Image (cartoon, helix red, strand yellow):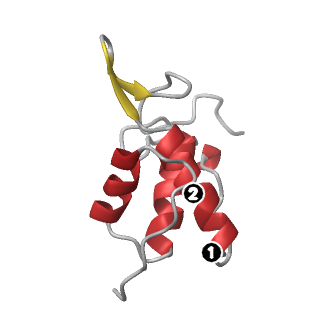
């Protein structure tokens, strides 16, 4: 007979178990439209310093929020490096064109 007190491991990131299930799925391949949505996601959901720590500028959830993480992953799949993504966020234009991707 199964026990109702089954132990559930936590994710390696320190997030509760099942947190990965709440991640927004990545597209099977990244189109130009996906990349533009990702630019918008990382710019609109950029970090903001607040009295309680760093939060999402758009919805005040702990940073990085789901949409920021999704946008970062999509842009990385598109070939952008962390510095390129940081430059997009710094510019603050959600409609900014993508920089040319460099081969990895």
User: In the image, is residue 86 above or below residue 4?
Assistant: below
Depth check: give the residue in front, 23 or 103.
103
Q: Where residue 81 sits in the image (x, y, percent)?
A: 33, 69
Q: Where residue 57 sits in the image (x, y, percent)?
A: 46, 28
User: In the image, is residue 30 above or below residue 20?
Assistant: below
* Marks 2 and 1 in Cβ contact (< 8 Å): yes
User: Label 1: which residue?
Assistant: 30
Callout 1: helix, strand or loop? loop
**Residue 12 visible to the viewer:** no
Cα gap from disc 2 to disc 1, whole angstroms: 10 Å
User: Label 2: which residue?
Assistant: 38
Q: Residue at x 63, y 48 (%)?
A: 21
Callout 2: helix, strand or loop? helix
Q: Residue at x 49, y 68 (%)?
A: 98
Depth check: give the residue in front, 99 or 79.
99
Residue, far top: 51
């Amino acid at each position: 007979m199964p026990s109702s007190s089954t132990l559930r491991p936590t994710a390696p990131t320190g997030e509760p178990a099942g947190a990965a299930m709440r991640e927004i799925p990545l597209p099977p391949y990244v189109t130009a439209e996906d990349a533009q949505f990702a630019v918008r996601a990382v710019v609109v959901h950029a970090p903001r310093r607040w009295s309680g720590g760093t939060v999402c500028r758009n919805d005040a959830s702990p940073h990085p929020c789901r949409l920021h993480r999704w946008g970062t992953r999509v842009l990385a799949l598109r070939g952008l490096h962390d510095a390129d993504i940081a430059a997009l966020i710094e510019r603050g234009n959600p409609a900014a064109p993508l920089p040319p991707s460099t081969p990895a």
